[in-house]
Amino acid sequence: MFVTIDHRQGYDAWGIQTRVDQTREEPTQKLLKTLGGHVFLRLSKTSTGKSIWRWQLQGAIQHRHALGLLIPHLTVKRRKAEIILAFCETVGPKGGVQKLSEDVVKRRHALRLQLKEAENGH
């Protein structure tokens, strides 16, 4: 789970993604059926030459639904999921491109920092 910030043509483009990579397709298809998102076969392979299947969520709308279902069952990644869900609350109901207030930008930067700290075990 991560939040991206791309600097494009004078503005910040924010993104939210969650990914699960597997060498077997079945687990990714179960995630797709249960939580939505997308499944695809990656072009790269593991160090042993196995194919890699990726299930991916992208954007606030997909994350609101999936994390609402997942959070009660998470232990190790629970804090990260809660931070991503809080980030989703800063996105309008339809997602997409929008002008952000200074408060929302500050909130997003703070959440991104919290996410990095959670990744580092703080």
Image (cartoon, rainbow, N blue to C red):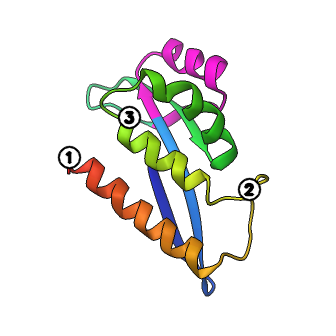
Q: Real-space Cα distance between discs 2 and 3?
A: 23 Å
The amino acid at mark 1 is: Gly
Q: Residue furthest bottom?
A: 10
Closer to the camera, 24 or 64? Answer: 64
Q: Which residues are magenta?
A: 20-43
> Which numbered disc, 1 or 2, marks the residue that appears first in the sequence?
2
Neighbour class for label 3 at 10 Å: few (<14), some, many (≥20)? some
Q: Real-space Cα distance between discs 1 and 2?
A: 30 Å
**Which of the 4 image quadrants contains residue 116?**
bottom left
Q: What residue is shown with label 1? A: 121
Say above or below: 25 vs 63.
above
The residue depicted at 55 percent of the width and 52 percent of the height is 16
Where residue 60 appears, x then y in whole percent?
64, 49
Report the disc number at residue 78: 3
> Which numbered disc, 2 or 3, marks the residue that appears first in the sequence?
3
Q: Real-space Cα distance between discs 1 and 3?
A: 12 Å
Q: What secondary structure is marked by label 3?
A: helix
Report the disc number at residue 95: 2
Where residue 93 appears, x then y in whole percent?
76, 52
Where residue 78 appears, x then y in whole percent?
38, 34
Where residue 100 appears, x then y in whole percent?
66, 75
> Which numbered disc, 1 or 3, marks the residue that appears first in the sequence?
3
Task: Pick the quarter of the image with the N terminus.
Answer: top left
Say above or below: 121 vs 112.
above
C-beta proximity under 8 Å, tags 2 and 3: no
